[in-house]
Amino acid sequence: MPTGQYLGFIGAGNMASALIKGLLESGVYDREHLLAADKDENALKKVSAGFGVKCYPSNLEVASACLIVVIAVKPQHIQEALEEMKEAITDRHLILSIAAGIPLKMIRDIIGKNIPLIRVMPNTPALVQKGVSALAPGDLATAAHMDAARRIFGAVGETVEVKETLMDAVTALSGSGPGYVFRIMECMVEAGIGLGLEKETARHLVLQTFLGAAHLAKTSDDSLPELRRKVTSPGGTTAAGLAVLEEKGLNDMIIEAVNAACARSLELGNRE
């Protein structure tokens, strides 16, 4: 019989590994109560060797042993994963899905049972326990279910609750967001090199600038526009740089990028 003491992962890739690491380091779970399944033997070996958790090649075995199951497979593999485990699923299970773009209705239809479901969109800073995860509860998810989800995903960062109708927007903003940030970082490093800085010096300056700016924004009582104004002296260097960004249409580019990611998230869910 499945038990609430065990947490199972269907999929043992990077995000599952990040969650397992966070859960162990925070003490929310111990390794004896974490299980993982994956078709990729190398992924299972890595999780087993790295964290000492129990690993299985069968999704059904994990679902049979755990009342809380995290679906951590790629969106294109979710139907296969759910088909393999659905006979073990009961109305006592709680399923947490981090598959981008996949609506809860699709999961419910594949499983063929109306059970508690929560859709989650974490992001890759979870790998260093600095992520943010949006949680969207299904109709049968109770306050207790949401508390369980917050404990799990809070182990790798912070959590927010949103309606499922906004999950595509979350995916586009914070799910894909690290990719935008990394690309901007790349461009700034290249600019620094172009001005004569050594690559590692430019990289160090850029990384610490982003880290420091984000920490300042998070801890300050000032709004983002106010923080920008405080660092921008009239006629100064920052003003000159920002003028170019505005001239080139930075605001429109960012909005278009986020909108494109949102549209792709909708496509992955096979919705209009």
Image: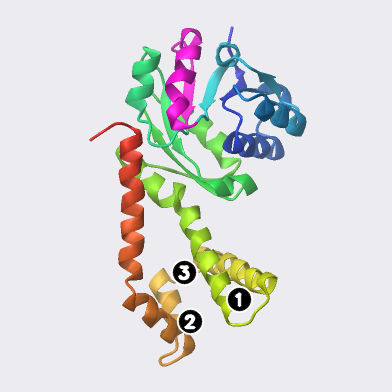
Tell me the mark number nearer the camera, choosing from 1 and 2: 1
Residue occupying image coordinates x 50% and y 54% = 178
The residue beneath circle 3 is 221
Would you say residue 82 sits in the magenta stretch?
A: yes
Tell me how far mark 1 sits from mark 2, CA to CA.
23 Å
Q: Which amino acid does label 3 sit on?
A: Asp
Q: Dot 3: what SS?
A: loop
Considering depth in this image, is 50 or 80 the residue closer to the camera? Answer: 80
Q: Dot 1: what SS?
A: helix
Residue occupying image coordinates x 40% and y 25% = 141
Give, as a single range, the part of the protein colored magenta: 74-97
Q: Quadrant of the N terminus?
A: top right
| Residue 174 x, y percent position in the rendering | 44, 50
Q: In which quarter of the image is the C terminus?
A: top left
Q: Dot 2: what SS?
A: loop
Residue 142 appears in the picture as rendered: no
The residue beneath circle 1 is 193
* Quadrant of the rendered image containing residue 106: top left
Q: Which amino acid does label 1 sit on?
A: Ile
Tell me the mark number nearer the camera, choosing from 3 and 2: 2
Residue occupying image coordinates x 36% and y 12% = 112
As displayed, is residue 197 above or below residue 272?
below
Going from N to C along the chain, the mark reached first, 3 or 2, is 3
The residue beneath circle 2 is 231
